[in-house]
Image (spheres, helix red, strand yellow):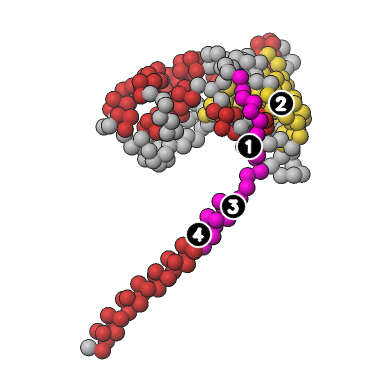
Amino acid sequence: MVFHYTELLAQPIEKIRQQLEDLQKADASITRIRELLGTQSLIEDGDSPLQLPGGPLSVEFRDVTFGYEEDNATLEGLNFRLEPGKVLGLLGRTGSGKSTTARLLLRFYDPGEGAVLLGDTDIREVRLHDLRSRIGFVTQNIEIFQATVRDNLTFYDASIPDSLIRQVLEELGLSNWLHALPHGLDTLLDSGGGGLSAGEAQLLAFARVFLKNPGLVVLDEASSRLDPATEQLLERAVSRLLKDRTCIIIAHRLSTIQRADDILMLDDGRIAEHGKRLTLLSDPGSRFSRVMEAGLEEVLA
């Protein structure tokens, strides 16, 4: 009987111990959350009433130097201009600074030296919300949130009508997929895109850009994970997306730069070559011509 009573006491004592352990973890978590909320971003929001112009945006880098570490420059002395409505193919080996260039456009970072201009306006003078609402950015890795199809596409913007969403999905070849969903646009998607193929997730990312209607589109090897059939479907949608918009295509594949007007090749953060695609292609001495002849995938991998 004494042993039985002792066992009865052990169980609530163990529960109290577990609750104290959970309380200690919660206290540590609250401390970390407070530190996170108290952290000030190094990117200060622009306080100027300036707004980016409508329509396709010009892109200009003026003597831009940037490094993630103070003594190690990822980009150095970058100078180029992309006219409104033109398409730039941005090429280079891994680590040459291609994705960093895109991050500077979105002001994830500010350059250490020089300036980045969109529509002839220094992006540091524009509010972050206004800046990022005018840029569409599609990468290889697509973020799908635990929310409805509608909210995943519109980012909770209730001003976008369902009719426009359905129209965009139909143009992207996703109408059959939408009709197969049990609750249509109200269908809940799993976090991380569970249940979606890589092609469906990529097409949903493009649908977001269509609905955003930006003046500049940045495609960071956006079709690399697609099968040939889906990629062909996406190519037709991209042609429509880029109409009357400026575009920067970061590419490792031959097929993705065929529509580029200009080519910019980076090497260790510096411009190795820059010019019109057809001009560079017709010049056997150009670096771009040699890369195309040897095979873009093999040379830039």
| Magenta stretch bounds | 28-53
Instruction: Indicate the quadrant where residue 211 lies.
Output: top left
- Mark 1 or 3 closer to N-term? 3
Q: Which mark is residue 38?
A: 3
Query: Disc 1 and disc 3: Cα gap in Å?
Result: 17 Å
Kind of residue indicated by mark 4: Ser
**In the orientation shown, which residue stands out farthest toward the front?**
49
Q: Is residue 168 left or right of residue 298?
A: left
- Mark 3 or 4 closer to N-term? 4
* 196 or 125, nearer to the observer: 125
Is residue 203 visible in the rendered structure shown here?
no
Rendered position, 72 above or below 8: above
Q: Which residue is mark 4?
A: 29
Q: Which residue is mark 2?
A: 61
The residue that appears at 74% across and 15% down in the rendered structure is: 285
- Mark 2 or 1 closer to N-term? 1
Rendered position, 79 above or below 14: above
Q: Which type of secondary structure does the marked residue at label 4 adopt?
A: helix
Kind of residue indicated by mark 3: Gly
Label 3 Cα crowd, 10 Å radius (few <14 / some 14-19 / many 20+): few
Q: Which residue is mark 1?
A: 45
Query: Disc 2 and disc 1: Cα gap in Å?
Result: 20 Å
The mark lying in front, picked from 2 and 1, is 1
Query: Disc 4 and disc 1: Cα gap in Å?
Result: 29 Å
- Mark 2 or 4 closer to N-term? 4
Label 4 Cα crowd, 10 Å radius (few <14 / some 14-19 / many 20+): few
Instruction: Indicate the quadrant where residue 148 lies.
Output: top left
Rendered position, 43 above or below 224: below
Residue 257 percent across, percent down from the top left: 58, 19
